[in-house]
Amino acid sequence: MTAVIVWFRQDLRLSDNPALYHAVANNKPIIPLYILKESPNYEWQMRGAQRWWLHESLISLEKSLQAIGLKLILRRGNPEQVLDELVQQTKATSLYWNRCYEPHTITCDKAIKQKFKQQGIEVESFNGSLLFEPWTIKTQQGNVFKVFTPFWKACLAAPDPLSPYPIIQRPSAFQGVVQSDVLKEWLLQPIKPNWAVGIEQTWQPGEAQAHKLLEHFLAEGLPHYDTQRDRPDQEGTSRLSPYLHFGEISPRQIWQALQGRQDSTKFKAELGWREFSYYLLYHFSDLPKEPFRTKFKQLAWEDDARSLKVWQQGRTGYPLVDAGMRQLWHTGWMHNRVRMVTASFLTKHLLINWREGEKWFWDTLVDADLASNSASWQWVAGCGADAPPFSRIFNPIIQGEKFDPHGNYIRKWVPELRLLPTAFIHKPWQASETTLKNAGVELGKTYPYPMIEHSKARTRALDANKVYNWAHNKNGD
Ligand SMILES: Cc1cc2nc3c(=O)[nH]c(=O)nc-3n(C[C@H](O)[C@H](O)[C@H](O)COP(=O)(O)OP(=O)(O)OC[C@H]3O[C@@H](n4cnc5c(N)ncnc54)[C@H](O)[C@@H]3O)c2cc1C
């Protein structure tokens, strides 16, 4: 019987997986495939933390498929060539996948679809990753939204997202021999030095764990989400972002779990920001590299490799910034409020191009996602869609006092400050010598002085490059 290749990408799950579901429904023997894409010149290839996650996620997917009698085939290389070989080797007559929305992937997918259709292969793609696909939401005039609130209102007024697909039953496996790579040989995870120890201790990738986390969040987190979501010292958010990125859970499954919950408006809106990011990336494919508000192209950023490194390493002398950057390095994740503060610090206090921050997050986040990362960096830098003006500069001291009022987040990630009284934990340089001494802190030795004074940085950011004028230019785009 002719087989169907189910090409897994950012949908590493069995449940609510439309491509897999339709393959099973068609009752054809299934060849599940994952391709490690190799496009040497592509800037946004998977990097460190994502590769770590992918390794674990593929092990988990492999096991789940095995349990229903299917064997995951692993191949690496150029997807079009890999698929070509596999079609020839297996004589498969159908190819199914769930859609991705990165511009580079869209281009490749179009070419693949065209090529295989010409060869008489049935090629079908499905929506497995979004609640509302980008081309389905338009203004009343048929234009693209550039502001979140009306975009989200239009989404909520649109037909409800489909319900998740039912669990698949008794798939039939392809009986031929198909060669597969050995996952370990892909070297997705570090060996020496193993920088991923903290990531290993923090995360357990895979579909089952995604659902466990969701259940836990629905019971413990959601009722307090509105008030706790900005608190990095609390477990106030779902931590589902890497699972969503790799498609170990689908937004439709989350959406369905939220039905009937009166307390879910804010959380749904955050899923909405994810949708908006994908929407922007789809309609403005330059989002990862060009400022959405084009006037920002003229901004003369500082070329300051030393300060960039200090920021990356969490040694800026601002405890909240340093805690965030260290949490990121250690766990591959950072709380959203602190992502905003650290991103603002890089782009405003240090006047370093948001693209440098975008790249660092791309390397280090387990949830690194082209849409959400580029849209969010542009938003904080002030050049993005619906972004506040450049003049909105987060004060890392006030942010710390407000959102980590007892200093517990700092004590966890900047342990050299843990004995400082709470009153000084977000501004150790204001503590008396005795207080510092009693806490075992020696500024400049055990913990740095602020690399730039806040009000000076703020003035510099507003003055420099005439940004101040742009921010007040009503005609600015
Ligand atoms: C500079 C910067 C870079 C970011 N880079 C990424 C990234 O690469 N990948 C990523 O998934 N998110 C990114 N975000 C958005 C946000 O910080 C994370 O999605 C969130 O912290 C994930 O934690 P959570 O799952 O506990 O979120 P929750 O608060 O539980 O939210 C639930 C889900 O909604 C989505 N979401 C929440 N907030 C946002 C947002 N502002 N934008 C887009 N989606 C959102 C995520 O999928 C998240 O898992 C970035 C934010 C900033 C400020």
Image (cartoon, rainbow, N blue to C red):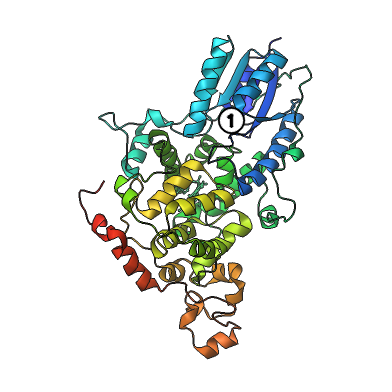
Q: Residue furthest bottom?
A: 434
| Residue 336 in the image, given as x and y percentages of width and height | 48, 55
**Total number of numbered discs in the rendering:** 1
Query: Is residue 399 depicted above or below 99 in this figure?
Result: below
Is 355 in front, or is 201?
Answer: 355
User: Which residue position is annotated with label 1?
Assistant: 16
Q: Is residue 281 left or right of residue 117?
A: left
Check the picture and name the quadrant holding the N terminus: top right
Query: Is residue 218 depicted above or below 113 in this figure?
Result: below
| Residue 156 in the image, given as x and y percentages of width and height | 38, 36
Give the residue at x 68% y 19%: 85
Query: Is residue 414 depicted above or below 476 in this figure?
Result: below
Q: Residue furthest left?
A: 474
| Residue 122 in the image, given as x and y percentages of width and height | 57, 13
Is 265 in front, or is 200?
Answer: 200
Give the residue at x 30% y 59%: 465
Is 225 in front, or is 89?
Answer: 89
Q: Is residue 12 left or right of residue 131?
A: right
| Residue 424 in the image, given as x and y percentages of width and height | 49, 79
Give the residue at x 78% y 16%: 176
Circle 1: is it few (<14), some (14-19), or many (20+) Cα within 10 Å?
Answer: many
Residue 261 appearing in the image: no
Query: Is residue 207 depicted above or below 416 in this figure?
Result: above
Query: In which quarter of the view is residue 146 placed?
Result: top left
Disc 1 secondary structure class: loop
